[in-house]
Each structure stands twice: as C-alpha cells, then as structure tokens.
C-alpha cells in the first residue's frame, strides 16, 4: 500500500505518507496555553507519518476564536515544548500550523477590538462561535499597510518561536477563508493599493509571508495549505482558477517543502461560476513542491490518489481525529471509530483523548 510507504519531505524522513491535517480543538486555556491533554492527544497520533497541529495564533492580534492556542508568549512556547518533546520521544514528527484569522473573528474574544481584514467587508451568510455564544459577524477594519508589515513580521517571529518550541517545521494556513486567503478573494479584498486590484497584488500578501517564513526558518521546514475552490468563510473569487494559477506559479519560484492542497467539500457548494475541475489535477500538476492532497479521503480514495502520481502524501482530518492508530487500521483493514461532532470544538478529555485504539 502506497499510503504506508516511507517518503522524504524537505528535511524530514516520514515513516508513511499519511499526514494528520490541522484541526482546531479549542482546548487551550484563556491565555492560549495548551495543557497535558493536548500532549496526550498528539502523542496518541504519532503513527501518522507527520502531524500538523491545530491552527496556532501568531499574535494576540491574530485571534479569532476563544480557547485557541498561541505561540507568541514564553508560556505558550514552553507548553508546546512539552508536546513536541513527547511526540518526538514516541517517534513522531510535528509541524505547527500558523494562523491569522483576519475577519473570521469577533470583538468579544479580541478584548473589544474589531477584527482586521483586507477590506471592511463582513462575512455574509455565516455566524461565528464566540465565548458568549453564536454571533453575527461584525464589519472588520481595513488593515493598514503598517499593520500588514507588522503581521508579516509576526509570522516570521511565530515561525522562529515554533522552532524554539521544538516543532519540525511550520505550515502557513492560507486555506479556509482566513487572512491569507482573504487577500486573494474579491469578496474580502477591494483594496486599491499594492495589496488589491490585480491578481499579482492580491497574491502579494501570501507570497511575502512565505518569503518571511522561509528566511526565518529555512525553506525545507516550510509548507503552505491552500483551498482554491473551497468557499468557506464567504471566499468568492471572480476567477479562482486564474488567481490560484498565478499564486502557484509564484510559489514555484520559492524554495520550500510542500503544498497541502485542500479540495472543495460537498458540504460547501462552489459558486456557479467556479470550474468543475479536480483541484489536485488542475493545480497539483503545476506545483513544483511536494503535493499533499486533502479533504474527504479514505483508504481507497487516498490510495487511488497516490496511484495517480500527482500527490505524494494524503492528509486526513476527521479520520485521524477519531482514530489515533489510523495507519494500523488501514494496514489491517480494521473498522474505524466514528468522529463525534459534539466534542470537536471545546470541552475536555471526552472526544479528545478517549477514542479507542485497536486492541
Ligand atoms: C474539528 C475540525 C477542526 C479543523 N480545524 C482546522 C484548522 O485549524 N486548520 C486547518 O487548516 N483546517 C482545519 N480543519 C480542516 C481539516 O484540516 C481538513 O482540511 C478537513 O477536515 C478535510 O479533511 P478530512 O475530510 O480528511 O476531514 C478542521 C476540521 C475539523 C473537522
């Protein structure tokens, strides 16, 4: 089975091609510090060839949702050290996913401050989970050029902090409607300066952040997650194929390890003007870096995707959430535990560290 074959990814030697994708679990404390349950949760999943952490806030300003972890204070970094140490002691590899939520946030969980975004355009047709319940999205503030420069520096510092915390690398979360992807979408970016207007201008932020990450920690420890046709977070692009083709062409000029390419989900239908192409075929075949395919894969479809040859690894989200020993289950064709949606975000041990292993 290809999924269980070894592979080299940048400087990392992976024992198999099954990656655990990033999943927010909202179990940090009020100060964004992860605890012993988080150490246990990631350690339980070391049979993955590589683990991506849940999205981690690069700064206080990057905050969108309650109880999500950060990597900008010494206490946060110290807490992550316990996670990376334990994962490494048990033979695993773990990369930190770096997160700025942009307009996907609420002032309730931002000390009363409105979120910053490319333009003052609120998310339509969705609501936000806050510490005071579900709320409508607010109109964000347009991020200034100085704030953009500071944000790019914050990404670089967060990447250095991640390496200090013992992570094996960093992944830029440029998927799912958060700040980097907001810059690419006309539904969130109507700027008239060098970060808006033309496709190259709208791609500038993502490319500058990637350059910052590469210079901060070295390209072989850097990757990016993108979701070109996934409209989650009200990401509507006029011409998503053209925008992401340009982005991929420019990313190809940079020296880094991988692109995690997330396909659209059947639960979030694309706007009518979007192309029907399969994202792995369309963009994956253009990408120079190693491609990790994501979204909706199981054993059979993951194996079939690897057989096609474009993607070299598959990342699994919910299947790893519910099956800490997923590679072993694939190997022995064992039944899978079902994920419990009620305990995905927030809470304690239940639905976090109590999914059973095979006996
Ligand atoms: C509970 C939960 C939290 C998630 N949080 C994140 C996240 O923090 N960062 C991210 O890039 N994707 C996040 N995702 C998306 C997953 O990484 C993945 O892309 C998605 O679940 C599709 O893969 P799957 O079909 O294998 O589950 C989350 C998904 C779930 C179910």
Image: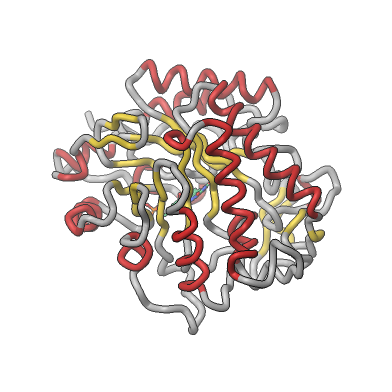
Tell me what residue is drawn at x 34 percent, y 30 percent: 12
Residue 55 quadrant: top right
Whether residue 192 is visible here, answered yes or no, is yes
Q: Is residue 52 left or right of residue 132?
A: left
Tell me what residue is drawn at x 61 percent, y 26 percent: 161
Tell me what residue is drawn at x 20 percent, y 42 percent: 330
Frontmost residue, 200 versus 348 = 200
Frontmost residue, 8 versus 321 = 8
Residue 323 picture location, percent across and down: 33, 39
* Quadrant (top left, top right, bottom left, bottom right) of the N terminus: top left
Q: Is residue 220 left or right of residue 62?
A: left
* Quadrant (top left, top right, bottom left, bottom right) of the C terminus: top left
Q: Is residue 63 above or below residue 13?
A: below
Residue 185 picture location, percent across and down: 61, 68
Q: Is residue 173 above or below residue 244?
A: above
Applied colour scheme: secondary structure
Which residue lies most toward the bottom here? 272
- Mark count: 0
Tell me what residue is drawn at x 61 percent, y 18 percent: 78
Residue 59 picture location, percent across and down: 71, 37
Residue 251 picture location, percent across and down: 47, 53
């Amino acid at each position: 089975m290809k999924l269980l074959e070894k592979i080299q990814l940048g400087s990392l030697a992976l024992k198999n091609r099954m990656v655990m994708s990033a999943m927010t679990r909202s179990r940090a404390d009020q100060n964004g510090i992860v605890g012993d349950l988080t150490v246990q949760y990631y350690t339980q999943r070391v049979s993955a060839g590589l683990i991506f952490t849940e999205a981690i806030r690069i700064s206080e300003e990057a905050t969108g949702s309650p109880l999500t972890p950060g990597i900008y204070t010494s206490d946060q970094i110290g807490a992550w050290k316990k996670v990376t140490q334990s994962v490494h002691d048990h033979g695993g590899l773990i990369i930190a996913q770096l997160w700025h939520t942009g307009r996907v946030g609420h002032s309730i969980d931002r000390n009363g401050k409105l979120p910053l975004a490319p333009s003052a355009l609120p998310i339509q047709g969705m609501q936000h989970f806050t510490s005071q319940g579900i709320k409508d999205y607010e109109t964000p503030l347009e991020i200034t050029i100085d704030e953009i420069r500071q944000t790019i520096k914050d990404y670089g510092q967060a990447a250095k902090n991640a390496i200090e915390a013992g992570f094996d690398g960093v992944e830029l979360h440029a998927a799912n409607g958060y700040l980097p992807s907001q810059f690419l979408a006309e539904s969130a970016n109507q700027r008239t300066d060098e970060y808006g207007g033309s496709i190259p201008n709208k791609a500038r932020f993502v490319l500058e952040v990637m350059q910052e990450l590469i210079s901060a920690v070295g390209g072989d420890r850097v990757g990016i997650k993108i979701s070109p046709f996934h409209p989650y977070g009200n990401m509507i692009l006029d011409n998503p194929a053209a925008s992401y083709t340009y982005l991929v062409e420019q990313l190809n000029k940079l020296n880094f390890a991988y692109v995690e390419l997330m396909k659209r989900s059947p639960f979030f239908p694309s706007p009518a003007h979007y192309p029907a192409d399969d994202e792995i075929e369309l963009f994956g075949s253009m990408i120079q870096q190693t491609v990790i395919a994501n979204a909706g894969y199981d054993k059979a479809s993951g194996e079939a995707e690897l057989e096609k040859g474009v993607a070299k690894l598959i990342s699994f989200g919910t299947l790893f959430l519910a099956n800490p020993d997923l590679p072993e289950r694939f190997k022995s064709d064992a039944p899978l535990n079902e994920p419990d949606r009620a305990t995905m975000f927030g809470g304690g041990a239940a639905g976090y560290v109590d999914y059973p292993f095979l006996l």
